[in-house]
Image (cartoon, rainbow, N blue to C red):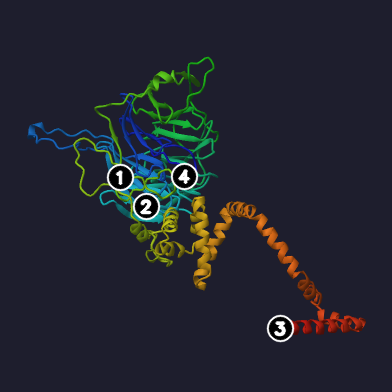
Amino acid sequence: MAAETSSSSLQLPCVFSPQSRQYLALCAQDGRLRIWNTDSKTLHQEYVPSAHLSATCICIAWGPCRTVKEGPQRKKRKSEVVLGEEKADLLAMGTAAGSVLIYSTVKGVLHCTLDGGHSGGVNCVQWHPKDSLLYSGSDDTYIIEWDLQTGKARSKWKADRAAVTSLCVSPDGKLLLSAGHIIKMWDLDTKEVYRKFTGHSTAVTTLRFATTRPPDSNGLYFLSGAAHDRLLSVWQVREDGKDKNSVVSFTLTDEPQHIDLVASNNKEEAVRLAVVCKDGQLHLFEHFLNGPCKKPLSPMCSVQMSDTKDSPVPIPMLAAALAAGTRAVLLGYGTHLQPVMEKLEINTAERHVCLTRDVQTSMSISLETAVSKVKTPFVGDKSRVLAPGLPGHQAPVKGTTQGSEKRKKGTETREMSIAERLGEIDLSAVSTEKGAPKGTATLQTDNFAVLLLQGLESNDADILNKVFQTRKEMVIKKTVARLPLPAILPLMEVITKRLQGHPIAATLMVRWLRAVLMHHTSYLASVARSDCSSSADVDHKAKLVYEEESSDDEASGDEGLPDNDSDNWEEEEAMEEDKDPDSKGDSKANGEEDMERGNESEEE
């Protein structure tokens, strides 16, 4: 079963392997994939994706069991040839970056990576039961059919107006259920809609087929669960097409988090259902699907778990798996970092069962030293590791050597040079056309901050020209925000010089000046205030001398000027001349005296 979940929710995927239920795969908060052995209760494998911090795992799904050769073996005689045992091998992981990782549990390595198909986070992945095909649904509203033999997308089609949150393939491999705003059933041969079902107001997180009968026999049923919904709805695919409403509902205490069921092969066989809710409770159902049922069905048995302290604290359940032949239930409870697996038979005669466990003694990790394969991804030249300090600086990371593997020449990591960084952010490499593919290079703000700091320290015009050529407001704002305070004054000096240059360069510098004033105004004001306080006495004396020399001239010059606030200043001037003819004569006399004084000063 795939642990389908929306990228906006905080649900962590947790899935048992098919058939034998030998392994429990889950992703914890640190983004690492851990595979636990349910028989020995030990950590079997651990895989760290290279982008486990930036592109976390959203959903995981086990592939069909297959026969896999674990390594090179000697040739056997014909009498010694034995059919290999089918094991759960491949595990598909959908990430928030839009890629799908295929991990091999038998070999303990990454089998392949399926990328380039989705532009949004992958919310659900589902395997085809027979062919080597994989289906993925994403936030970009598309469904992609992947061919695992070639590692490429086989077909891609738009499923809904909203994000695709859940997928499920029918047991015969001919139909596909998808959920967005509504639930759609697709014909996988033609990729056309076969039926539509509406009934959930929130995102559908779970889709499971409950029967294995063909759709034209009125005996094909499937169930669906949605976020913030305490009901599981069962839908019937009718031959006449009158299947718009659900026929059966199962009541829960909270929204479903993990579902496992034993499908019904005929009408005389009941469907067994185990549902783990978000509140940590387990609900068991058993029902014969034979037409509609008006009342919602209550669980046959509800199971809770708590510790053995004086004041009991509930222990959350993570997943549950039903056995096909027996009444035993395999439980996984505790935390995602240290889960506890236990197989037990529950007395379904009681409606409510409370189990007490000592979690402290049960949750001690015992790591298999001989069988465990803890894998660390290989760190190549394209890997970028975040280090403390200024964003963009890369810390050299040493790849771990495992066993007898020899390190190849030319694979050592090194820090990128300035020329290589300039080549990466070269504006000519970034396509601005509308039809350009999405895989073109994009400008990174951390590279701009590092390059701008290096250019200011070395006063290199080439580096500064490369950085100042950008016209994106967001890139400029983030670059200025990430600069350290000692680099602000040198940046202001460079901006001031370039503002006095060519007009085109000045228009670009205005954007940088605006960004500096937005982010570092307080710092510039504090620096200017400290400079003013240190030179306050000298400026004050100079100001007094200047006022004594120029006080007479300023007074004489301002008296004859009209008021700038008045719009009809010509009319006001004419009225003043009519009212005060003497003042006009005085002004003329004063003007003549000023002229005479000027002439005398020139003669002197």
N-terminal of the pair, mark 1 or mark 3, is: 1
Q: Residues within 10 Å of mark 3 (few under 14, many from 20)?
A: few
User: Splitting the image into 4 quarters, where does residue 274 fall?
Assistant: top left
Give the label, 3 or 4, closer to the camera. 3
The kind of residue tagged 3 is: Glu
Name which of mark 2 and mark 3 comes first in the sequence: 2
- Mark in the foreground, 2 or 3: 3
Identify residue for label 2.
144
SS of the residue under disc 4: loop
Kindly identify which numbered label has been placed on residue 285.
none
The amino acid type of the residue labelled 1 equals Val
Q: Name the amino acid, label 4.
A: Ser
Which badge, 1 or 2, comes first in the chain's sequence? 2
Tell me the distance, in whole angstroms, between the alpha carbons under discs 4 and 2: 18 Å
In this image, 497 relative to 152: left or right? right
Residue 69 in the image: state x and y as whole percent.
Answer: 19, 37
Which of discs 1 and 2 lies nearer the camera? The answer is: 1
Residue with the mark numbered 1: 379
Q: Secondary structure at mark 2?
A: strand
Q: Which mark is residue 602?
A: 3
Q: Circle 3 sits in a helix, a strand or a loop, which is it? A: helix
Say few, some or many: other residues with alpha carbon within 10 Å of mark 4 (under 14 / 14 to 19 / 20 or more): many
